[in-house]
Image (tube, grey):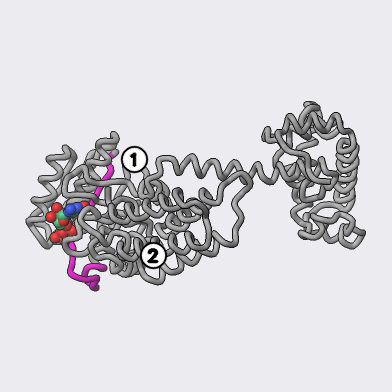
């Protein structure tokens, strides 16, 4: 596994959180310190590291975990999200016949990566044509030809031709149809005018679907500057970071390239043709943190936060404190069989939207209108419907593009729900029965 040391330290942090008797200020300070040390050792930029750990600390002290989640799990999730955040966006990579241009400096792994990508496509059922457009080094052409033989894909080269773009044009004309075409280009010692001009000429002929920069992870943070410069000069659709297997500085390269705005698509993890892995930040972080289970932890959180709002609304309703805000939650949870919609469907009059098939369409349209109206209200209005006098009703109508009558209809619906809820709250037998079904405790009165 790449970034082994970083992964080990971060997993150590999570274990510390799991073992600690309480999540308190002392533990948080220790966790923040450990994360800092781990990231800096992996060559992640100092400022980036400090900002990340500051956010972890701030969120852990200021944000509240959703009801039902432990502080411990919440802290783990914050750490996961923040580390995930410095690795860039997940980007799909299409496996179909299309044209890919590989560029990069000297010795970064372009030719090897062209071979690896060819195998990656072919293994997944897409035939590949490799084009040797490195005109400066004859050995590079032989190298690519060897790789093409190993992979068993199409190959085109013209050892006598001195124009890379001509080679590409000939390859396009000669290859059979429906190939993924991968073009290997020459490297230089720096980004110079000649290199950029050559890439632009090749690009004009190839019309690539992807322009991918191949970068050696051993550059560490400097990989970020290189990616940025290439991105500005030729416009990149992605980056492949090579030699992550041998580099302790991988964290610096990964995070710095992510900042450049060009997504990392693959990572090279060895010299062999199969040593190429898709890079997806979300999965990568899960693996790094050693959490086969982080996925289930995250899903659990997702459910909890939806459930939390619905449960709170249900409690308010039963406690006779039903607000417009709760009504909005009600509308949002209609259709999901959460505790709240269960409650609504059991109440006379309120479950009508779900039961009366004939009116369902009309009702749903109306509920959608209600939601846009509620979205035009201020937080104060959502908490206190008594504020809603004529002038506010007109403002909300304008803001939501509805007629004032519709806003009044919403308020009437709200009022009848509240009254029904009040009746429900005072019917102790019915209420106990509901509470049992919902698994909620009686709200304080
Ligand atoms: N360990 C390891 N070595 C790699 C990886 N990718 C490439 N290499 C090695 O890096 C060296 C340079 O690779 P090339 O593919 O020739 O690099 P290039 O960018 O085409 O080089 P030029 O064409 O000379 O500019 C070779 O020895 C490769 O075996 C990787 O992911 N891991
Ligand atoms: Mg090469």
- The stretch of residues the image draws in magenta is 179-196
Query: Is 348 displayed left or right of 281 in the figure?
Result: right
Q: Is residue 373 magenta?
A: no
Query: Is 411 displayed left or right of 14 in the figure?
Result: right
- Residue at position x 73%, y 35% from top? 341
Taking the image as four quarters, which one is ligand 1 found in? bottom left
Query: Residue 329: percent from the left, percent from the top?
Result: 73, 45
Choose the circle earlier in sequence order: 1 or 2: 2
Q: Looking at this view, is 53 or 184 the one in front? A: 53
Q: Secondary structure at mark 2?
A: helix
At label 1, counting other C-alpha atoms closer than 10 Å, the crowd grade (few under 14, some 14-19, many 20 or more) is some
- Residue at position x 21%, y 71% from top? 190
Query: Residue 25: percent from the left, percent from the top?
Result: 52, 62
Res 334 seen here: yes
- Residue at position x 67%, y 35% from top? 336
Query: Residue 413: percent from the left, percent from the top?
Result: 87, 43
Q: Looking at this view, is 415 or 403 the one in front? A: 415
Q: Are marks 1 and 2 in contact (CB under 8 Å)?
A: no
Q: Which mark is residue 343?
A: none
- Residue at position x 75%, y 47% from top? 328
Q: Looking at this view, is 315 or 235 the one in front? A: 315
Query: Is 111 displayed left or right of 330 in the figure?
Result: left
Res 92 seen here: no
At label 2, counting other C-alpha atoms closer than 10 Å, the crowd grade (few under 14, some 14-19, many 20 or more) is many
Cβ of mark 2 under 8 Å from ligand 1: the answer is: no
Cβ of mark 1 under 8 Å from ligand 1: the answer is: no
Badge nearest the viewer, 1 or 2:
2
Q: Which mark is residue 36?
A: 2
Q: Looking at this view, is 184 or 208 the one in front? A: 184
Q: Which residue is mark 1?
A: 96
Query: Residue 371: percent from the left, percent from the top?
Result: 75, 47
Q: Residue furthest front?
A: 21
């Amino acid at each position: 596994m790449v970034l082994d040391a970083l992964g080990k330290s971060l997993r150590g942090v999570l274990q510390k959180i799991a073992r600690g008797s309480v999540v308190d200020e002392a533990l948080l300070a220790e966790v923040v310190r450990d994360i800092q040390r781990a990231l800096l050792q992996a060559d992640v930029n100092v400022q980036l590291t400090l900002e990340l750990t500051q956010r972890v600390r701030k969120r852990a002290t200021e944000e509240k975990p959703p009801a039902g989640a432990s502080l411990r799990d919440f802290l783990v999730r914050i750490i996961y999200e923040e580390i995930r955040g410095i690795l860039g966006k997940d980007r799909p990579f299409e496996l179909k016949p299309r044209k890919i241009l590989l560029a990069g400096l000297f010795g970064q792994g372009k030719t090897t990566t062209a071979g690896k990508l060819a195998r990656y496509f072919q293994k997944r059922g897409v035939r590949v044509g490799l084009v040797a457009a490195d005109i400066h080094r004859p050995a590079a052409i032989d190298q690519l030809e060897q790789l093409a033989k190993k992979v068993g894909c199409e190959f085109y080269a013209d050892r006598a031709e001195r124009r890379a773009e001509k080679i590409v044009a000939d390859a396009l004309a000669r290859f059979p149809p429906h190939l993924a075409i991968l073009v290997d280009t020459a490297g230089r010692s720096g980004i110079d005018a000649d290199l950029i001009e050559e890439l632009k000429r090749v690009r004009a002929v190839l019309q690539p679907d992807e322009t991918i920069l191949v970068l050696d992870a051993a550059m560490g943070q400097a990989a970020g500057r290189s990616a940025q410069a290439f991105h500005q000069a030729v416009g990149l659709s992605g980056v492949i970071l090579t030699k992550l297997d041998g580099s302790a500085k991988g964290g610096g390269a990964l995070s710095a390239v992510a900042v450049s705005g060009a997504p990392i698509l693959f990572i090279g993890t060895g010299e062999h043709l199969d040593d190429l892995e898709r890079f997806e930040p979300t999965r990568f972080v899960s693996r790094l943190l050693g959490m086969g289970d982080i996925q289930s932890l995250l899903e659990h959180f997702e459910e909890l936060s939806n459930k939390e709002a619905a449960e709170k609304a249900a409690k308010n309703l039963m406690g006779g404190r039903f607000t417009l805000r709760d009504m909005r939650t009600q509308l949002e949870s209609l259709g999901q069989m959460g505790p709240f919609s269960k409650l609504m469907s059991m109440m006379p009059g309120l479950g009508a939207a779900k039961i009366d098939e004939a009116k369902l369409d009309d009702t749903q349209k109306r509920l959608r209108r209600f939601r846009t109206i509620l979205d035009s209200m201020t937080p104060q209005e959502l908490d206190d419907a008594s504020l809603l006098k004529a002038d506010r009703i007109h403002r909300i109508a304008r803001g939501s593009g509805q007629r004032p009558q519709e806003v009044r209809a919403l308020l009437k619906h709200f009022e009848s729900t509240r009254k029904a809820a009040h009746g429900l709250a005072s019917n102790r037998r019915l209420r106990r029965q509901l509470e049992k079904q919902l698994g909620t405790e009686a709200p304080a009165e």
